[in-house]
Amino acid sequence: MSQLTATRALLSGNEAIARGAWEAGVTVATGYPGTPSTEILEAARAYKADIYCEWSPNEKVALEVAAGASLAGARAIVTMKHVGLNVAADPLMTLSYIGTVGGLVIVVADDPGMHSSQNEQDTRHYARFAKIPILEPSDSQEAMDFLALGLEISEQHSTPVILRSTTRVSHSSGAVALGERRAPPEIKGFQKNPQRFVPIPMNARPMRVRVEERMASLQAAVDSSTANRIEWGDRSLGIIAEGIAYQYVRELAPDASVLKVGWVWPFPDKRIREFARGVKRLLVVEELDDILEEHVRSLGIPCEGRRPGPWSHREAVPGIGELSPDRLAPVLGGDGGRPQPSSPAPASATLPARPPVLCPACPHRGIFYALGKFKVVVTGDIGCYALGVLPPLKRLDTILCMGAGVSMAHGMQVVESRRGAPAETEKPRDRIVGMVGDSTFFHSGITGLLDIVYNKGAAVIIVVDNRTTAMTGHQEHPGTGRTLMGEPTVSASVEEFGRACGMKNVATVDPYDLKATLETLRLALDSNQPWLIVSRSPCPLYTRKPVGPARRVNQELCRKCKLCLKLGCPAIEYINDEIRVNEILCGGCALCEKVCKDGAFGMAKGACDE
Amino acid sequence: MVGVGGQGILLAAQIAARAALAHGHDVKTNEVHGMAQRGGSVVAQIRFGDRVFSPLVPEGSAQVLASLERIEALRFASYLAPDGLAVVSSQAIIPVTVSSGQADYPADAEERLRAAFKRLVYVDAIGVAEKLCDSRVANVILLGAMSTALDLPRECWIEAVSQCVKPAYREINLRAFDEGAALALRA
């Protein structure tokens, strides 16, 4: 939808990063989908004539591919969400020693407030940990500009650079001035230099020293960088702010003096000291951890923020969850001149909660419903199927991280198996089921499966294969048969992976076929062997086709046993003691028809069918 | 603009933002993606003016609150300014929390809307959309209705709709937009 020919366009932070990469001559872009970072590579695909783009199987691979491209002399970016950097931490830490040749920017999108994440870790720690620079834009224009700046820093100082976005930068749109693509530096191909590129201990030790020398040159660069700027105003209050928090501060305190920090680490000490000298009171506003604030204190400069300062009589900056103008108003004093909410008694009182749910006709619903018929513990994973934890399905018991659905099942099954058969007075033991999505299986489930078979485990692993990376908005992966560039390719087989690991019991089920699914589950759960069950049906949101015709409830046949409500289908509504199907929502999967004992569900006909 | 995941709020928000941009304003928007989109409450925020800093709308300051579902308007009522306009589709999407017996769907939603909002346009957007034979254009009907409270000329809205929908759907979306505007003016 972006208007690529206009000179000014409305771009999300993610679209702006992709545009920035194109304009700055990037030729390789890799990543793994993860909210809020996913749209960067999807937008980069628009420039595929100039940029090779790929969804890698996981973030570690993505960073290693980008590192290879950089060492071959090309400008490259790699994108991921904050927890993805944990997966890529291994290459990150040593790439810092080896350094880069072509500019390399690692774009990491944090998710303060955990809109779509399992934690809210602060990526800035990684920059200090790996001793590499980190830039933090506060809007779409800066997202584009800082991507180019990051590539320049990377090439000048031979270091990977992190560009840290957050949900409110990545998913906010703003006007951006568009330019043309600048020719990238000449790509010379890989130039052999073992002392630089092979960190065996004898080479790694001098590399370690060079990292510290680089730190010194980066410190000089950050002190003169225009990415950090002082906006002098009323000097009674000076605010140091970065990222999206800068925008909130500018809105709430238009007259205050502000040090806007865009190049966050190494810390811009010279600017911080200059700014602190010029203001009476100093406040640090940063989202998530108090990294800047602690550093300002370590310079011997009194300030307030997360912790009170010597003058403090305001509320502290919240350190849990994301910031907003509403949350910062009490910190900065007053309500910022905004009118108060309209109704004193909140209109939202006593409204029913509306949590996210599995979509109508979601194939995962069939497998969750079937699992409800057995005594099992389900170790889950990251994806849409995480929603199986909510009532009424309640068929998911743990989530840790990508791939852990497989490996944790093994650990639990080891313990359960060693407890031996239960005594007569005891309840039967739970069978352990690990659940993982197709994209997550290829990301980091394979090694867990290998572990189960190799170490003679007995967990039952269900790969819920909906033929796409659904939760993040339907990205391709190694099993879909298509690349990010839109080209047909091989389609990796989950079943063949299982067999290659040595798994003897491999079955495939259609989750809409409740009867066959139940039979297969019974076979697997009654055995004391490991199983790999692939529950396969494409996500209907991805195919954009209903599974079948919409259903309707025949009220004369319905005895209101409410069995269908146990499916947790948002299209089946129970209100005023009547069960009915919302035909606009219904995707025609017919699971309701299959669980109904009264034959009350039949096909509906719409008004515009002709 | 609020509603339930899957109703087309993000597209509607894109159109509104582009209409403001077409009129020469500085614009910022914010949206919810990912997990929250799966049938949950969804909110998109659009701000425009000479210079916009924060993409987030402070509570009590929105000129317009448009909701594609009747009780979602109540959920986000605190964002509307006291003299703001609420444009609400009468569509009810029953949350699973209600169907599974954990909560009740308010039977008095319309009365509560009338009590909460001094200026309310309450429309059967789905009914109007189905008359146009495409229930998916309910979001653009709401855009038309809310356009009556925003100082943006019709050409800007038409340009924005044309940018955001496929050419094959342009005509029906423009009809939906005009229907929505007419409904609001009659209300």
Image: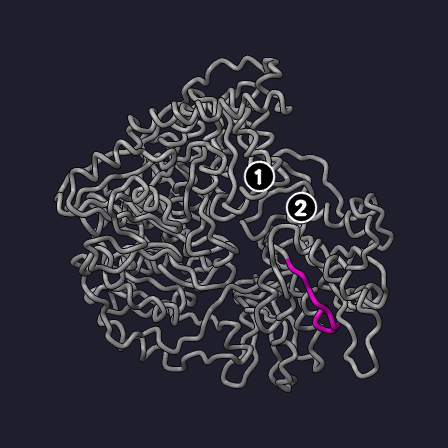
Highlighted magenta segment, given as a residue range: A371-380
Q: Is residue A483 above or below residue B138?
A: above
Q: Are marks 2 and 1 on the same chain?
A: yes
| Residue that badge 2 annotates | A444
In the rendered image, residue A142, in percent from the top left (x then y), is placed at 34, 35
Instruction: Say which amino acid is labelled 2.
Output: Ser
Q: Residue at image x 38%, y 35%?
A: A265
- The x, y position of residue B2, in whole percent, is 38, 61
> Which residue is farthest front?
A300
Instruction: Pinpoint residue A568: horizontal percent, then vertical percent.
Output: 59, 71
Identify the disc placed on residue A163.
Answer: none
Q: Nearer the viewer, residue A327 or A316?
A: A316
Residue highlighted by disc 1: A88
Q: Chain of mark 2?
A: A
Look at the numbered disc 1 and give the secondary structure of its residue: loop
Q: Which secondary structure lies at badge 2?
A: helix
Q: Amino acid at mark 1?
A: Ala
Residue A450 visible somewhere in the drawing: yes
Q: Residue at x 37, y 29 (%)?
A: A5
Q: Is residue A147 magenta?
A: no
Q: Is residue A304 left or right of residue B123?
A: left
